[in-house]
Image: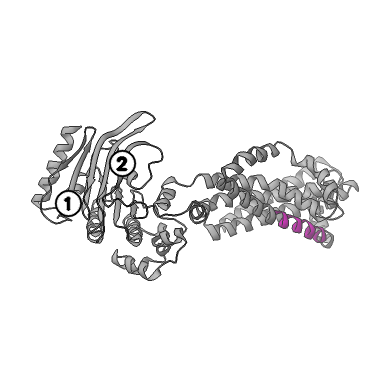
Amino acid sequence: MKKVLHFASVALLGLLAWQAVVTFGDLPRFILPGPMLVFSTLWTSRMLIAEHAVVTITEVLIGLGLGATLGFASAILLVASPLARNLLRPMIVFSQAIPVFALAPILTLWLGYGLWSKVAMALLIIYFPVTSAFFDALMRTPVAWVELARVMNATPARILWCIRVPAAMPGFSSGLRLAAVYAPIGAIIGEWVGASRGLGYLMLLANGRAKIDLMFAALIVLAVLTLVLHAAVDAVCRRIWGG
Amino acid sequence: MSGAPALRLTGRVTIGGTAIFGPLSLEVPAGRWTCLLGPSGVGKSTLLRLFASLGDGVDFEGTVGASDNMPLAGRVALMAQSDLLMPWLDVTANVTLGARLRGTQQPRERALDILARVGLADHGTKRPDALSGGQRQRVALARTLMEDRPVILLDEPFSALDAQTRARMQELSAELLAGRTVLHVTHDAAEAARLGETVLLMTREGITPVASPPARVPRPYDSVETLAFQGRLLRQLMETV
């Protein structure tokens, strides 16, 4: 309750500051619309925004699911096979030197204007944090646990599955939490580069037509969606792995 | 326990050229409780780990094995200073960890029976973080018993417990591990005086046996005989350092 009150008062303060800037700065509505106007646009255009939001949510959720699965599997592979570690790790790190943003046009070229180029963007942007967080956690299994398992005649594969993976789940969770925040960024970039649907597309369209109030309304919806996604992932991780 | 072998080790250990111990020779009698007493840093744990095939990080020149010349792998159970419980498993699952790790069926009935013997019958569904330090170490003891191995290696398993809990754990362990070949590494003279049917003193110079009193283990912590033995052990420890 205290947390909610705290959050509400911060939000209210932010809105007041926003309105003050618009009122006293005498800014035209196509430069910075006030919060009242943005919220009224949010209400009147709710069907339009919802339609596009559903597209973005779908892209984000598929990207998150695929990215998490791929990241999980990659980290396991890297830990299980020294050969894979030697070959793939430098490649994965090098791939991070390429700005994902720069890949968006190529992905659109390869995968088309539809859903999958955005899913690929979301996937690419979350793959590294998930893989890296889980891999690091897998490499940090307490040595004494592994030794106990060895004395109990466990094979390396059983040690990995019964001890190292469960012990590393908090690390996987922190990767997922990051992914929940990054995945919408990937989807939006994909939509900016080339799309006919989605919140990113709507924002670009509204911007081009000087409907800044609609752009802000879409932006608010996107921010809220990201926060909800993060909270949901956090809640699931806590429930399953307690951390 | 029938078929519990004696343990033998001869040789020396170095780590990157630095001598840790030896050359020395050690014989742990079959089916008895042997305390290896010594100050920190003389290589007691390293020596114990050699019997568990955990000597990865050290250079060992010599032989280590059992009196029956059969391999020790698969006949050894280990209990360390830390309880090593898996925080994501409940108590019963922790006790049956060995079966889970070997991919064999988990004998639940036996696990519950052993939990009852260590006095934790009502705690089977709890997670380790809901237990006290003493209870956690009793779960570790239950897990060790569950393995049902003839050779038990104890690496200061009671040193992190408070005095009262430690005394109880010593009694419980002595009772439940009786008949097995136990090698118990400790730096506590009082503990060795209570538990050691054979007490070996390990110093930089090597290993020397110390004659122990005839009373059955666990010896009473407050008997004159135990206290005198404790004093004698401590004196010998002091003289060597």
Instruction: Residue A227: tell me if it is visible.
Output: yes
In the image, the segment drawn in magenta is A49-63
Labels 1, 2: one chain: yes
Query: Gap in Å between the C-alphas at discs 1 and 2?
Result: 25 Å
The residue identified by callout 2 is B63
What residue is drawn where x is 80% and y is 48%? A190
In this rendering, which labeled residue sits more in front, label 1 or label 2?
A: 2
Residue A185 appears at what percent x and percent y? 74, 47
Residue A133 appears at what percent x and percent y? 59, 46
- Taking the image as shown, residue A148 lies to the left or right of residue B39, namely right
User: Does B37 lie within the magenta span?
Assistant: no
Callout 1 secondary element: loop
Instruction: Residue A176: tell me if it is visible.
Output: no
- Taking the image as shown, residue B212 lies to the left or right of residue A105, namely left
- The quarter of the image holding the N terminus of chain A is bottom right
User: Does A52 lie within the magenta span?
Assistant: yes
Residue B91 appears at what percent x and percent y? 40, 62
Q: Are marks 1 and 2 in contact (CB under 8 Å)?
A: no
Q: Amino acid at mark 2?
A: Thr
What residue is drawn where x is 33% and y is 53%? B76
Disc marking residue B139: none
- Quarter where residue B143 is shown: bottom left
Query: Which residue ends up furthest to the left in the rendered image?
Result: B224
